[in-house]
Image: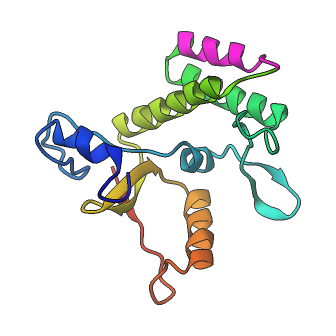
């Protein structure tokens, strides 16, 4: 979503305006989210002896060098449990079946990511805490808020020099 040429801007223009996630009076709100950050926020990290926060699951089958079938199964099970808890039983069953695939392909991962985006939307629809990363004029994503996510973002911002005067800025939204 970031940058003037990002595809989301043409999509938003079709609605006649950009969408401000803070404007609750609008009947339609469109947000961009990011499955990787949602994975962190939902606490789906895996144990890593070298990182206290754990490591991200490597579940993209298109990246054969880093893909892990165990990680694939982990993400599927976490996602299925979340979907089931939110009343999406048929979708949870599909994801549980996907967990049994021995050779998932990229389109399977894309479908999992779409389901992760759905549970982010459910999270937001239930007025649970969320975090806006970016800004309304140049682009942003909205993800569930968590201490673990804020910690990971702070580390990344420090690595790339994105914090200002040692301060990490994040905006919580409901």
Residue 102 sits in which quadrant?
A: top right
Asked if residue 99 lies in the magenta stretch, the reply is yes
Residue 24 sits in which quadrant?
A: top left
Q: Nearest the camera: 38 or 126? A: 38
Percent coordinates x, y for residue 167 in the rendering: 47, 82
The answer to whether residue 106 is above or below residue 23 is above
Residue found at the far right of this picture:
49
Q: Nearest the camera: 165 or 81? A: 165
Residue plotted at (40% across, 52% down): 141
Percent coordinates x, y for residue 76 in the rendering: 69, 27
The answer to whether residue 98 is above or below residue 135 is above
The count of marks equals 0
Residue plotted at (63% across, 23% down): 108
| Dominant secondary structure (helix, strand or loop) of the stretch shown in magenta | helix
Q: Nearest the camera: 24 or 157? A: 157
Asked if residue 56 lies in the magenta stretch, the reply is no
The answer to whether residue 88 is above or below residue 43 is above
Residue found at the far bottom of this picture:
165
Percent coordinates x, y for residue 101 in the rendering: 77, 17
**Range of the magenta residues?**
90-102
């Amino acid at each position: 979503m970031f940058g003037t040429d990002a595809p989301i801007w043409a999509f938003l223009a079709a609605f006649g305006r950009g969408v401000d996630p803070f404007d609750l009076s609008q009947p339609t709100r469109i947000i961009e989210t990011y499955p990787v950050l949602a994975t962190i926020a939902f606490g789906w990290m895996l144990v890593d002896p070298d990182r206290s926060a754990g490591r991200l699951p490597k579940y993209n089958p298109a990246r054969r060098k880093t893909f892990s079938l165990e990680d694939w199964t982990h993400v599927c099970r976490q996602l299925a449990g979340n979907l089931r808890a939110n009343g999406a039983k048929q979708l949870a069953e599909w994801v549980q079946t996907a967990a049994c695939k021995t050779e998932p392909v990229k389109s399977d991962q894309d479908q999992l990511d779409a389901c992760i985006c759905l549970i982010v939307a459910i999270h937001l629809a239930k007025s649970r805490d969320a975090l806006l990363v970016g800004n309304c004029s140049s682009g942003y994503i909205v993800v569930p808020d968590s201490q673990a996510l804020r910690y990971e973002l702070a580390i990344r911002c420090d690595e790339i020099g994105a914090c200002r005067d040692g301060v990490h800025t994040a905006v919580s939204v409901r």
